[in-house]
Image (cartoon, rainbow, N blue to C red):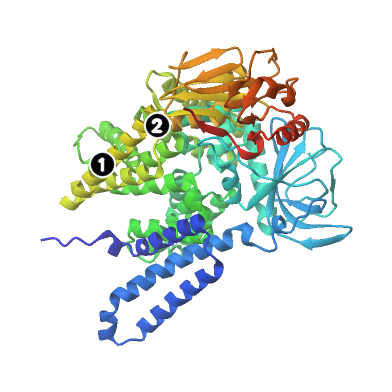
């Protein structure tokens, strides 16, 4: 009988990765003090040291204790990594030393990027102070330059002197909205600054690292080459993203089409691209295979090429993971050793999390590892379901088997983050994956022959045509009825349960172990219970949500799974505003639009839902005389209406005032003082985020 070796014994780094990841999550959520973390870390190291010097008998006797010590060691290591990575804990951070009125010196970390209404760059704040007394600092900030500013001369390494106030990065605070503040914090950014034409001075001397001095000019040259030879805005924008991960020129609608059809992964530099680079190097170095020099030259050249390409592509987690994984495969191959793919994946994830523990929350990091692991586990069993003699059909089935396998573990993550599932992912992946691979190879060839215009120009046109074919195919699939299952909502607990279900049934089918099936069934029952509970709550909810949308009035009144929208009609025609500000909340609450909500009465600016009365006051509001005082639960103030709260209180008994983000700041100060004097509670959506209230 064959002996089955558990995966954690074939891949020992899994036993280190799990407690490390757990420690990272615990530290981020509980923020334990540094002293406690070092005490726990030191105690676990001491316990392991004592175990090491025990005799063999005692060591066997205390195996459990040493195992627990190892778990605690990596738990505390993960927590320490998070503490030291958090820029808020650094006493030399500019955010911890900045005082209103301070001046600053900023060093651009990247070339400026043009936006719709400004130029944008990330900069390191190297010093702050005033009256020529400056203190050296650390930390990054986002700098926005006004469009009419003379900033085109600025480049990577440029130093600027500025005196404008920093603004702390805040979230809009809408339900289920994108956590932009945490996203920036994970990159070491806590503040932003807006500079007009005469609010900064460019210093003469640049500060550039060796890395930036080498790679940014190369990157700039590659971008120039692609733009010169590949016609079409959509085409060269996608070409830049495919080759070196430059996404600033990507068409937003095109990216949405790729996302809706399940092939957005080909835009992100990942294992697919590194696999092509690896294959190219292997083919080029084949003639040296039989020579003695190849034993050390081949792995050095391949690994160097992989990492140079990874750094040129911006050093994203997905590409670094792939580079590290391929490096392990190359090293093991040169040493004539067969490596466990599970151990290689665990090792690469372990190293990357030690470099940056915040990558654990990176969507690309999660999807990348889930896809590779899913393919490794499920591709072969799925492929073996059918035996096909025809070579062409067999190749087609192999590609589809890879796509199906990849979806099994990535679906819980993609639904959690994007709330949708591409129903026709097999059709899009079948064309997009090989075609995008051909395009990337063509772009590499274009870079090689760029010195010969008579070859580069027609080559660029062919690449542009291939990209156009791929884009057209993706957009056609997206337009088909039922191509996208939208509005899916699951929480993190349901993600974990789905992963257990997939892993359990997979373990049962592959290893014929009943324990896997039992675990999967139990997880499925819990999943059904949580889903049923969430839908029950959705059917019985009654809420008012006043959204935080810059310069706009927008609110939803929710009754069960229906909602009534009131506010600026222009938002509904703005796809970006709807998707960014409104759609996440509506998916979270599982609601659909309704022409008329049950129990909702609306007369001009007065809305009554159940026993709750809501008064909307905007620039179109007309204040009329009424007999008696009417009880108003919530007054929502928008725009710049001509009102006085002292007059309003003569007609209305106001329990709560909500000011939305369309109210002018100068008027808001005046109205807040009026509310204070009248003892009326008020809520500023711009500062506190969306106003959410349960209705009676």
Residue 630 rendering spot, x and y as whole percentages: 60, 20
Indicate the secondary structure of the residue bearing disc 1.
Answer: helix
Vertical relation: 495 (above or below) 306: above
- Provide the residue designation for mark 2: 488
Residue 489 rendering spot, x and y as whole percentages: 40, 34
In the rendered structure, find residue 660 and report the number of the disc placed on it.
none
Q: Is residue 211 left or right of residue 346?
A: right
Identify the mark nearer the N-term, 1 or 2.
2
Residue that extends furthest to the left in the rendered view of this protein: 1
**Residue 461 visible in rendering:** no
The residue positioned 68% from the left and 64% from the top of the image is 91
**Residue 165 visible in rendering:** yes
Residue that extends furthest to the right in the rendered view of this protein: 131
Within 10 Å of disc 1 (Cα), the crowding (few <14, some 14-19, many 20+) is: some
Vertical relation: 591 (above or below) 595: below
Residue 333 rendering spot, x and y as whole percentages: 38, 61
The residue positioned 74% from the left and 35% from the top of the image is 677
Indicate the secondary structure of the residue bearing disc 2.
Answer: loop
Viewer-proximal residue, 343 or 516?
Answer: 516
Residue 289 rendering spot, x and y as whole percentages: 41, 58
- Provide the residue designation for mark 1: 524
């Amino acid at each position: 009988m064959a002996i089955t070796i558990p995966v954690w014994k074939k891949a020992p780094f899994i036993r280190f990765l799990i407690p490390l990841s757990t420690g990272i999550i615990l530290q981020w959520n509980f923020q334990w003090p540094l002293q406690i973390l070092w005490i726990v870390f030191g105690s676990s190291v001491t316990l392991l040291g004592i175990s090491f010097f025990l005799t063999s008998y005692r060591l066997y006797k205390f195996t459990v204790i040493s195992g627990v010590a190892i778990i605690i060691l990596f738990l505390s290591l993960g927590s320490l990594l998070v503490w030291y990575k958090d820029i808020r804990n650094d006493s030399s951070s500019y955010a911890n030393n900045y005082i209103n009125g301070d001046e600053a010196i900023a060093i651009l970390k990247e070339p400026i990027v043009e936006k719709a209404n400004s130029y944008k760059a990330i900069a390191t704040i190297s010093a702050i102070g005033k009256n020529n007394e400056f203190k050296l600092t650390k930390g990054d900030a986002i700098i926005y330059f006004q469009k009419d500013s003379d900033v085109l001369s600025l480049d990577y390494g440029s130093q600027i002197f500025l005196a404008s106030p920093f603004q702390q990065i805040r979230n809009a605070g809408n339900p289920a909205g994108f956590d932009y503040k945490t996203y920036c914090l994970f990159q070491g950014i806590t503040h932003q600054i807006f500079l007009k034409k005469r609010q900064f001075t460019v210093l003469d001397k640049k500060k550039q690292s060796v890395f930036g001095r080498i790679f940014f000019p190369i990157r700039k040259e590659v971008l120039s080459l692609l733009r010169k030879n590949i016609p079409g805005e959509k085409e060269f924008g996608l070409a830049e993203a495919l080759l070196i991960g430059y996404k600033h020129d990507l068409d937003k609608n095109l990216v949405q089409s790729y996302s809706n059809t399940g092939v957005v992964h080909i835009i992100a530099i990942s294992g697919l691209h590194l696999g092509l680079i690896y294959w190219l190097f292997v083919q080029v170095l084949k003639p040296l295979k039989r020579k003695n020099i190849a034993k050390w030259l081949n792995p050095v050249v391949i690994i160097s090429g992989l990492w140079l390409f990874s750094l040129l592509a911006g050093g994203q987690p997905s590409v670094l993971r792939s580079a590290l994984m391929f490096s392990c495969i190359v090293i093991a191959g040169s040493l004539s050793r067969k490596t466990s793919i599970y151990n290689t994946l665990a090792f690469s994830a372990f190293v990357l999390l030690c470099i940056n523990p915040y990558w654990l929350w990176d969507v690309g990091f999660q999807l990348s590892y889930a896809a590779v692991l899913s393919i490794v586990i499920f591709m072969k069993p799925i492929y073996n379901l059918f035996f096909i003699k025809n070579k062409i059909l067999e190749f087609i089935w192999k590609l589809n088997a890879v796509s199906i396998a990849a979806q099994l573990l990535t679906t819980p993550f993609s639904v959690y983050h994007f709330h949708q599932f591409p129903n026709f992912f097999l059709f899009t992946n079948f064309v997009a994956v090989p075609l995008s691979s051909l395009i990337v190879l063509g772009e590499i060839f274009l870079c090689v022959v760029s010195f010969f215009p008579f070859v580069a120009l027609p080559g660029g046109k062919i690449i542009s045509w291939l990209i156009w074919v791929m884009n057209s195919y993706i957009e056609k699939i997206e337009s088909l009825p039922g191509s996208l299952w939208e509005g899916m909502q699951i929480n993190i607990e349901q993600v974990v349960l789905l992963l257990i279900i997939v892993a359990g049934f997979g373990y049962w089918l592959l290893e014929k172990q009943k324990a896997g099936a039992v675990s999967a069934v139990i997880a499925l029952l819990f999943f059904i219970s949580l889903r049923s509970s969430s839908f029950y709550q959705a059917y019985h909810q009654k809420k008012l949500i006043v959204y935080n949308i810059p310069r706009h009035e927008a609110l939803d009144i929710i009754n069960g799974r229906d909602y009534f929208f009131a506010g600026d009609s222009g938002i509904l025609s703005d796809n970006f505003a709807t998707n960014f500000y409104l759609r996440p909340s509506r998916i979270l609450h599982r609601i659909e639009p309704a022409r008329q909500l049950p129990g909702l009465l609306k007369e001009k600016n007065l809305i009554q839902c159940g026993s709750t009365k809501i008064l909307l006051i905007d620039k179109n509001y007309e204040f009329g005389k009424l007999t008696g005082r009417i009880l108003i639960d919530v007054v929502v103030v928008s725009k710049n209406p001509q009102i006085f709260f002292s007059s309003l209180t003569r007609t209305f008994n106001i329990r709560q005032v909500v000011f939305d983000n369309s109210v002018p700041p100068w008027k808001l100060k005046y109205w807040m003082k009026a509310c204070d004097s009248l003892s009326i509670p008020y809520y500023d959506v711009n500062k506190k985020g969306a106003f959410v209230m349960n209705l009676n």
